[in-house]
Image (cartoon, rainbow, N blue to C red):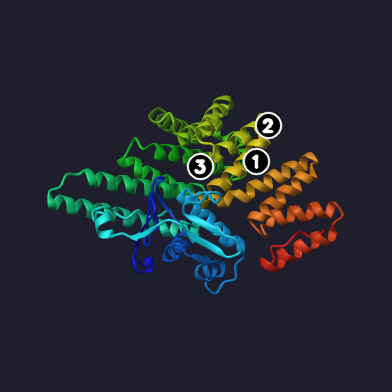
């Protein structure tokens, strides 16, 4: 069997669809990045045989020079998706200094039999690091999702079948829209936040008890109130920190107050419907913190973290509240934990993590600098740069630290490289 000639294969306990990117098995259903799926197909084509590193890199990145770390990350993502352990592999074996080998049996799958034609294709969350691409994709995704549901419904109505399957289709469409709305929300721009509000409300118009949509709408309404006060008077039109928004006082006045009350009601409903939902508890904590109810907010945030050890948004918010209430020493470990959680969840939610991961790492470094702990600050700047090479704030921060420590040559080298490779986004002159 040659996997290159088919579009669906079974690998051990897993079933993979190349066109859709879906991987289904013991861990449920997940969508692989294109290169991860290409890697799986390449290894499956040579199941039981070693595939050399050079061959893999040439196949995945044709005409592009990449380092071993790119291949290692892609292998790691595939292993994670398959639930495999590099130390005791059941699927992917590392052959030292040679390459990798797929251990599991591979067989083709008849997609026409395995996937009912009435089931609409699961549409992937938009893997975009820019809000512009998200906006361009939104209309197409929504249209395709709704069209698939309508077509499925029409087929079943004509054939006289019961409506159970269309309900599943509607559930799939609902999840696509909520995930897209979440991606918009986490860009934290005004236009994206408004797009998220529209999508959440569209879902709730059809499914009033959808907990992720209730929670998401609560978050987006709070974000609208905190960041963009609807006031014609003088002063800033956007706030980036809750502390500053509270100090301004607009959150205690109309129309922000009414929106916060609505957001609180939505979040409370979400918690009531799903007490074990970390997303719902985080949303309720956010609405409470925006109203200055910090003790209650911390309680909800901590409940979210207790339910999900990777709830990095709640961790960041705990740190914010602790700083606002005068406990900066207690806040820093939460920021560090949030950074680690972002790294653990990057593979499955890169559109939400990427805009904030480096920024949070730099903020942690700056807090250590303000304490006079230069060693910890340098470690954090270098950590960010290891994950995000040439990140301008991290590069500038590290260069400034090195220059202050007397290592002018290295500081100048960092600044020169940043300027050369980023079209002028260099460091300020010393």
**Which element is circle 3 on?**
helix
Q: CA distance from mark 1 to mark 3?
A: 27 Å
Q: What is the crowding at mark 2: few (fewer than 14 residues within 10 Å), some, or many (at least 20)?
A: few
Q: Relative to 250, is 351 above or below? A: below
Query: Image quadrant for the N terminus?
Result: bottom left
Question: Residue 413 appears in which quarter of the rendering?
Answer: bottom right
What is the x, y in percent for residue 208? 33, 36
Q: Relative to 187, is 209 above or below? A: above
| Upstream in sequence: badge 1 or badge 2 | 2
Out of 24 and 197, give the one closest to the viewer: 24
Q: Residue at x 80, y 62 (%)?
A: 412
Residue lying farthest to the top in this orientation:
295
**Which element is circle 2 on?**
helix
Residue lying farthest to the front in this orientation:
48
Query: Is residue 390 among what the camera can see?
Result: yes
Query: Image quadrant for the C terminus?
Result: bottom right
**Which element is circle 1 on?**
helix
Out of 65 and 405, give the one closest to the viewer: 65
- In the picture, the disc for residue 118 is none
Q: Which residue is mark 3?
A: 224
Tag 2 near tag 3, CB within 8 Å = no
- In the picture, the disc for residue 336 is 1
Query: Is residue 234 among what the camera can see?
Result: no
- In the picture, the disc for residue 330 is 2
Tag 1 near tag 2, CB within 8 Å = no
Q: CA distance from mark 1 to mark 2?
A: 11 Å
């Amino acid at each position: 069997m040659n996997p290159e000639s088919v579009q669906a294969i079974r690998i051990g306990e897993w079933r993979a669809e190349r066109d859709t990117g879906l991987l289904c098995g013991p861990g449920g259903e997940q969508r692989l990045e294109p290169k991860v799926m290409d890697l799986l197909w390449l290894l499956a084509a040579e199941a039981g045989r070693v595939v050399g590193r050079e061959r893999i890199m040439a196949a995945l990145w044709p005409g592009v020079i990449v380092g071993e770390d790119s291949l290692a990350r892609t292998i790691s993502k595939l292993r994670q998706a398959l639930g495999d352990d590099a130390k005791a592999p059941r699927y992917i074996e590392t052959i030292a200094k040679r390459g990798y080998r797929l251990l599991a049996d591979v067989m083709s799958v008849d997609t026409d039999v395995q996937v009912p034609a009435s089931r609409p294709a699961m549409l992937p969350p938009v893997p975009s690091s820019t809000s512009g691409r998200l906006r361009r994709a939104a209309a197409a995704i929504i249209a395709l999702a709704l069209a698939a549901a309508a077509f499925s419904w029409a087929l079943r109505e004509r054939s006289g079948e019961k409506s159970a399957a269309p309900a599943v289709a509607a559930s799939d469409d609902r999840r696509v829209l909520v995930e897209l709305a979440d991606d918009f929300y986490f860009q934290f721009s005004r236009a994206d936040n408004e797009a998220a509000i529209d999508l959440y409300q569209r879902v709730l118009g059809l499914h009033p008890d959808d907990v992720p949509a209730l929670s998401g709408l609560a978050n987006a309404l709070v974000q609208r109130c905190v960041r963009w006060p609807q006031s014609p008077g003088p002063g800033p039109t956007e706030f980036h920190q809750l502390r500053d928004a509270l100090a301004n006082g607009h959150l205690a006045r109309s129309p922000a107050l009414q929106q916060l009350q609505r957001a609180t009601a939505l979040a409370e409903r979400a918690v009531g419907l799903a007490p074990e939902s970390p997303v719902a508890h985080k949303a309720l904590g956010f609405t409470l913190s925006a109203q200055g109810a910090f003790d209650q907010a911390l309680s909800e945030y901590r409940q979210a973290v207790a339910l999900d050890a990777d709830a990095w948004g709640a961790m960041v918010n705990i740190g914010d509240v602790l700083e606002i209430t005068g406990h900066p020493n207690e806040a820093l470990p939460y920021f560090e934990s949030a950074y680690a959680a972002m790294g653990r969840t990057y593979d499955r939610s890169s559109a939400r993590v990427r805009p904030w991961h480096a920024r949070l790492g730099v903020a942690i470094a700056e807090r250590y600098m303000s304490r006079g702990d230069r060693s910890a600050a340098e470690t954090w700047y270098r950590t960010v740069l290891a994950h995000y090479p040439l990140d301008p704030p991290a590069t500038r921060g590290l260069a400034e630290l090195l220059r202050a420590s007397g290592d002018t040559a290295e500081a100048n080298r960092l600044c020169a490289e940043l300027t050369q490779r980023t079209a002028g986004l260099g460091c300020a002159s010393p």
